[in-house]
Image (cartoon, rainbow, N blue to C red):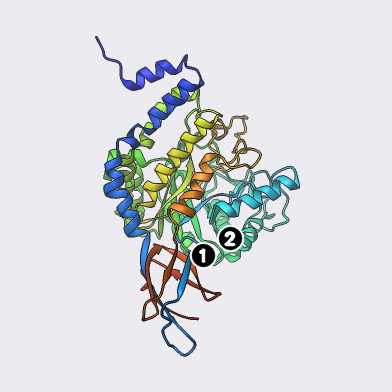
Amino acid sequence: MKSVSNSEKIRNMLASADAKQKNEAYRTLCMEKFENSKALLENTVNPNIEKYRKGDCVLRLTDQNGKPLDGKCVQIHQKTHDFKYGANMFLLDEFKTEEENRRYRDLFHRYFNLATVPFYWAELEPEQGKLRLAADSPKIYRRPAPDLCVDYCNEHGILPKLHCLFYDKFIPSWLPKRDETAMKALYEQRFAQIAERYAGKLYEFEVTNELLDEWKWELQSILCEKRDTPLWAYQLARKYLPNETLVINESNRVPEIAEQDYRSPYFLFIENLLAKGASIDKIGIQNHIFCGTKGPQETEIFRFLQYFDPEKVLKGLGYLAEFGKPLEITEVTIPTFGDDEEAEALQADILQHLYRLWFSIPSMQTVVYWNTVEGMAYVKPNGISTENRVRGGLFHRDFTPKKSALALKSLFEKEWHTDLESVTDENGCVAFRGFYGDYVAEVDGKTISFGIHCNNKNDLRLTV
């Protein structure tokens, strides 16, 4: 008689379970491998965070004459993180009321230090020659004008990143899609216009997005059929953005890379581009856990369980790290399996486990959550929103934080945060180890700014 697996038992049980039973089942499915990987956490993840995300610092305090100040009480507070944790900013001023827009503006800078800004060509230039770049451009839902986003980021000390330069899935209807020469000329014009306006003003520029999935796109030009189009896109980007960070971005493929290693499509794609001389500065990959996109979550979750496997996460990203480039998780969605507090608690627990894994990888520089406010995700022309179905937001529709938003904030403002008080020694020195970022030291009622940064000596002389 054929035995029934644990997953099959849970699948069968979910069909007739009540809310409490479903919560228990989802927690068992999602957390099983995390719970069984405590040795990995203790032996790899936590030590790596301590080793790669923190640095030793010595503050040498002197008076105006250079004399060491001994016996002084020093309070040290971390103000920012060098690690970038963000979300897309597609809802900036996109709500119906001023109060809603104010609340969104208020929450974003309190939870993130980076924002993905939409540069989708279809909405950036819906009419040929009429670019929607200025802050007061005509509104298009979920596509706030880039200047509006950049102005907000500059006001609040957030880094804006561009998404993305070449993405034939969202291109204007007026393009001559089957004319290769004309398409290349128009793309070059697009790259040049964006570079002229935004070079030196953005954190990074995503050049290509989801090219391994282009065969599924409903809108695409003849360029998607051409062998050397990806290389051409990077050469074009470097031509107009010689000093900027250029990012390659691809859809969910971490478990696939873990299983297929050096023969996985994304690995081979990057290797081929680099061998041909493509100027890629950073490797991005998405992490959308879209359980429930085609049916009930209880049938879809089994396709995504590999995303809850810590060993696969570290293994897959480890292969990408071998290219020697910084890594970025460019788009994150973590589902909420229900609408009660227990379901929200599970989403928060998953988020913390995944962010700890990503934060522990030495070459990881950035993690970007995707949708923030529940129910406001992308809706396809046919009216279906796969992203809304999974309840992957960090905030309720009334802008109150879900447990996941609070968990994310706690990671960077408590768990991975340095605040301490010490007393200078006879040489006026205070030595400590802190997370990389900008700091202030408070001494005798005075506030002095300094920073602890990777690859810096961090031996600092401060005059009080």
Secondary structure under tag 2 reads helix
Q: Are marks 2 and 1 in contact (CB under 8 Å)?
A: yes
Which sits in the foreground, 194 or 376? Answer: 376
Q: Is residue 430 above or below residue 410?
A: below
Which sits in the foreground, 357 or 122? Answer: 357
Task: Report the residue at 75% width, 48% height from top.
Answer: 98
Drawn side of residue 415 relative to residue 339, left or right: left
Task: Report the residue at 65% width, 61% height from top.
Answer: 151
Drawn side of residue 48 relative to residue 170, left or right: left
Give the labeled residue for mark 2: 194
Looking at the image, is mark 2 or mark 1 earlier in the sequence?
2
Q: Please provide percent x and percent y for residue 320.
A: 33, 50
Numbered tag placed on residue 150 in the rendering: none
Image-quadrant location for residue 135: bottom right
Q: Please provide percent x and percent y for residue 190.
A: 58, 57
Residue extending furthest toward the front: 71
At label 1, which amino acid type do we have? Tyr
Drawn side of residue 21 relative to residue 276, left or right: right
Q: Please provide percent x and percent y for residue 340.
A: 55, 29
Q: Please provide percent x and percent y for residue 18.
A: 50, 17
Mark 2–mark 1 Cα distance, whole angstroms, equals: 9 Å
Residue 403, visible in the rendered structure: yes
At label 2, which amino acid type do we have? Ile
Residue extending furthest toward the top: 1
Which sits in the foreground, 188 or 437? Answer: 437
Residue extending furthest toward the left: 1
Give the labeled residue for mark 1: 240
